[in-house]
Amino acid sequence: MKLIVGLGNPGIFYTRYRHNIGFMCIRHLARIQGIRFDKKQGNARTGSGEIDGQKVVLARPQTYMNASGESVSRLVKRLKITPSDLIVIHDDLDLPPGTIRIRHGGGSGGHKGIDSIIAHLDSQDFYRIRVGIGRPDIPEGSTEDKEEAVVAYVLSGFTRQEKKIINSIIPEVGRAIICLLAEGLDAAMNKYN
């Protein structure tokens, strides 16, 4: 059993924001695999099915991004799996839009949702699918607070040009997950990183 989690913020208000790329990717994966988010468990919307012969639960935590670990840890316990059976899809400011990076373990890179998951699981031993959203352009010497600028950026929509890139990368994330499940980490990294 694998738990595949897309991170984001619940509610229509946040639907198309950069921070919700994890939700966008998990919805696409569910759609192409014929999996419906028809349950509420562990403070998440979940759906069960099989991908390439592997039993999976897809989840969208409903706890808001910075508290994602509350939901993810409940699901890990409920499903009786280990952190190494967890795959998390999330946005990454340090990658250009349309870039994917797959890895296993490591720190959070400052991502508060990943920080929360690591804290609640007391483990870094899970897979991450990082999807690039780029950084806001803050001019050198600007009086604008950098953290406020980042928050405003992730909680805003993609530009028209970025939407084209994101619309093409979302299916790639689905293919990367299928590759990870079917062929393992090295193959997925070689094909998609």
Image (cartoon, grey):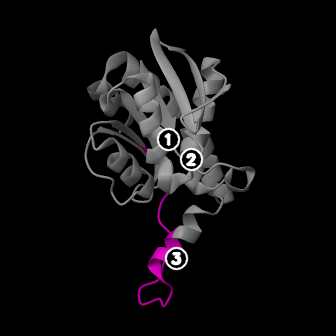
The kind of residue on which mark 2 rests is Ile
Q: Are marks 3 and 1 in contact (CB under 8 Å)?
A: no
Amino acid found under the numbered disc labelled 1: Ser
**What's the distance in space between the residues labelled 3 and 1, CA to CA?**
26 Å
Residue 131, which numbered label? none
Residue 132 appears anywhere in the view: no
Callout 2 secondary element: helix
Q: Residue furthest top?
A: 53
The residue wearing badge 3 is 148
Q: Which residues, given as a range, are shown in magenta?
A: 130-150
- Counting residues from the N terminus, which is met first, the one under dot 3 or under dot 1? 1
Main secondary structure type of the part rendered in magenta: loop
Q: Quadrant of the rendered structure where residue 104 is?
A: top left
Q: Where is residue 52? Give x, y as percent.
A: 47, 12
How far is mark 3 from mark 2, CA to CA?
A: 20 Å
- Give the residue at mark 1: 71
Q: Amino acid at mark 3?
A: Glu
- Where residue 21 is drawn, which disc sits there? 2
Position of the N terminus, as image quadrant, is: top left
Q: Residue 4 at what x, y percent from top left? A: 47, 30
Task: Between label 3 and label 1, give the one nearer the viewer.
Answer: 1
Task: Estimate how packed mark 3 is, as few (under 14), some (14 to 19) or many (20 or more) residues with alpha carbons within 10 Å.
Answer: few
Q: Position of residue 43 (x, y in %)?
A: 57, 39
Q: How crowded is the residue under tag 1: few (<14 C-alpha within 10 Å), some, or many (20+)?
A: many
On screen, residue 145 above or below 123: below
- Secondary structure under tag 1 reads helix
Query: Is the residue marked by circle 2 packed among few (<14), some (14-19), or many (20+) residues within 10 Å?
Result: many
Task: Say which residue appears at 39% left-offset and 34% top-offset.
Answer: 192
Compare residues 147 and 100 and report the one nearer the observer.
147
Residue 51 inside the magenta-drawn segment: no
Front residue (pair 186, 27): 27
For the C terminus, give its image quadrant. top left
